Structures are given as structure tokens and as C-alpha cells.
Image (cartoon, grey):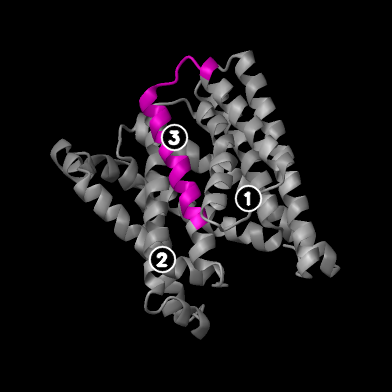
Amino acid sequence: MSEKMNFWIKAISMCLMYLSVGPALIVLNKHILQTLNFAYPVTLSSLGQIFIALVTHIIVRSGRATISDEAKEQVSGYGWVSCMFVGLFKALTLSFGNAVYLHLNMGYIQMLKAFSPVLMLFLLVITGVEGMPRPAIILSVLWIAFFTIATTAVEASATWTGLLYMGLAQGTEAMSIVLTQFLLKKKKMTIVESQYYLAPPAVFWFCIIACFGGEWFQIYINGHMSIVFAYPFRFMVAATLGLIVNYLTFAVIKATSGTMLKVLGTARNVIAVVVGAVAYNEIIPFNEWVCYGCTLLGFTSYTYLSMQQHVQEAEKSDKPVK
């Protein structure tokens, strides 16, 4: 089998796994939060990061993977400050992201995720990580913003609490990505190295939030640890899927590109919208589908124009395009 054929098989396999594992984790988390009545999003979100930290450190300690001297040097001294900030926003993103499933329909949540490029572009520009984009890109982002707001306007089941959690989830996710680019942009780490250094800070912040936010106290006084003991397999699967999603994200970028990850993320959200409508009998009005379709059209335009601008900038600086 040719090298090119091997590349395509590997890339397609990674993409298909990414498209399937993500919705599976979303459905399972919703099931645990609502059906099992384990309404503790911070604690549930922490399972994946705890498992990632344990597995990654076991891999490194057993000698199956090594941490390069360059990576060690990059996180020494004040480098840990960068990791702690990235871990904080990662913990907040996952916590708010799971909390929103207690207040909004699953399909509607995936529709709102199309708004992420708006926040991302805004933060990248004001922090100086990226320069002012072309007018066509700004127009695409405004298009996304308009039709996301339109989608919200026609959704009858939307609640202000759910929309607040959704906004916080997307805002903290954007900050996490921007901080990663801004603080770690010179740190070229492998998948294992990045998780080795970023997962423990995230676990630390999860513990702080769950403890001082009162979740652990509520679990104790309500006796809800019994839910974990009654359904241990489901919680273990949730933690395992969290690990797989994190590694697949890096693997997809390595096998294809960051742009492909954005496209696959949108496709995954569309799958989750359909799953929510079928599995949970969520009624999505026709005009909401139209608004969501227009949002996806804007997202497609944004992705294409961003990729085109990236290519042009790379050609000017004679750097390879990823």
C-alpha cells in the first residue's frame, strides 16, 4: 500500500472517529446529568481531565513516552503560570458547557455553538494575537452573529439561565484558545507533552470550583455518590470518552489541519442537533432550521476566507501552511 494511501486512510479514520465520539460524549453527559439526576456539571466535567492526567503521567512514567528537554524548559519558572491560566479557562469551559444541558435542548445548544467564531475573532484581535481581518471576514462574522441571534429569537424553550451558561461557556472557550495561542505559541509540544502539562492544572481548578462552588457539599448531603456507585460503568465511559476526544482533537490537527478541525466541529454539531431531535423528541421549528442553515453558510464563508488569508500570509512570509 502506498504512503499516500496510508495517509488518507489514517486521516479519514481520525475524522470519522472525531465525528462519532463527540456526539456520543454529549449524549452520555446529558443522560448522566438529567436521566440519572447527577446534576453536578463541574464534577462530571472533571472526570475526563482527571483520567487524561492519570493516563498521560502513567504513559510517561512507564517510559512509553518521553518529555523533551525543550518542553521541560518551556514550562519551567513562569511557564507554569501560562499552564495554570489555560487550565483555569479549560475547567470553566467544560463546567459551563455541561451546565447548559440542564437548561436548554441539546439540538439548540449545538446551534448556538456556531457563534464561537464571533467571540474568537474579537478576542484574537483585541489581544493582538492576530491583526485586523479583511472586510469579507468581518462581514461573515456579522452574518453568523445576526442569524445566531435570530435562532435564539425563534427558540421557544430558551431560558435566560441557559443562555447565560452558554455565553459563559463560549466566552471561556474562546479565552482558553486565545491564551493557548498567546502564551504557548512558541511551545511546539507533542500530544502527550501538552496533556502532561495542561491536564493537571485543569484538574486543580476543577477541584477548587467544585469545592468552593458547593457541588461536593451538595453531593455529600444529598447522598448522590450512590448514583456513581450504582452506575460506575457509565461514569467510566464518560471519563474515557473525554480522554479520547482530547487526543482525537490533536490527532485530527496533526493528520489534517486546524481548518479541518473547525469544519469537522461544525459537522459534529449538526449530527448532535439531529441526534437531539430523534433521541429526545426535541421539536425544532422550520424557521429555526432556516436560521441555523444561514448561520452554517456564514461559518462556511468564514472558514474559507480565513484559510485563504492564512495561505496568503504564509506565502508572503515564505512559511509552510498548516
Q: Which residue is mark 3?
A: 166
Q: Residue at x 57, y 72 (%)?
A: 188
Give the spatial CA distance, label 2 vs label 1: 28 Å
Q: Which residue is mark 2?
A: 83
Taking 153 as reference, is 81 left or right? left
Query: Residue 159 versus residue 222: which sits nearer the camera?
Result: 159
Q: Position of residue 203 (x, y in %)?
A: 34, 58
Q: Which residue is mark 1?
A: 17
Q: Is residue 55 visible?
A: no
Taking 2 as reference, is 114 left or right? left
Q: Is residue 272 visible?
A: yes
Q: Position of residue 63 (x, y in %)?
A: 47, 82
Q: Position of residue 237 (x, y in %)?
A: 44, 49
Instruction: Evaluate if marks 2 and 1 touch, with contact meaning CB atoms under 8 Å apart.
Output: no
Mark 2 or mark 1, earlier in chain = 1
Q: Range of the magenta residues?
A: 153-178
Instruction: Say if 286 sits above or below 34 in the image.
Output: above
Mark 1 or mark 3, earlier in chain = 1
Q: Around disc 2, counting alpha carbons within 10 Å, would you say few (fewer than 14), some (14 to 19), or many (20 or more)?
A: many
Query: Closer to us: mark 2 or mark 1?
Result: 2
Q: Say what amino acid the circle numbered 2 marks.
A: Cys
Instruction: Evaluate if marks 3 and 2 touch, with contact meaning CB atoms under 8 Å apart.
Output: no
Name the element at disc 2.
Answer: helix
Any magenta on residue 86?
no
Q: Around disc 1, counting alpha carbons within 10 Å, would you say few (fewer than 14), some (14 to 19), or many (20 or more)?
A: some
Q: Tally the marks.
A: 3
Q: Around disc 3, counting alpha carbons within 10 Å, would you say few (fewer than 14), some (14 to 19), or many (20 or more)?
A: many
Q: Position of residue 159 (x, y in %)?
A: 40, 21
Taking 92 as reference, is 190 left or right? right
Q: Residue at x 13, y 39 (%)?
A: 221
Query: Residue 226 versus residue 266: which sits nearer the camera?
Result: 266
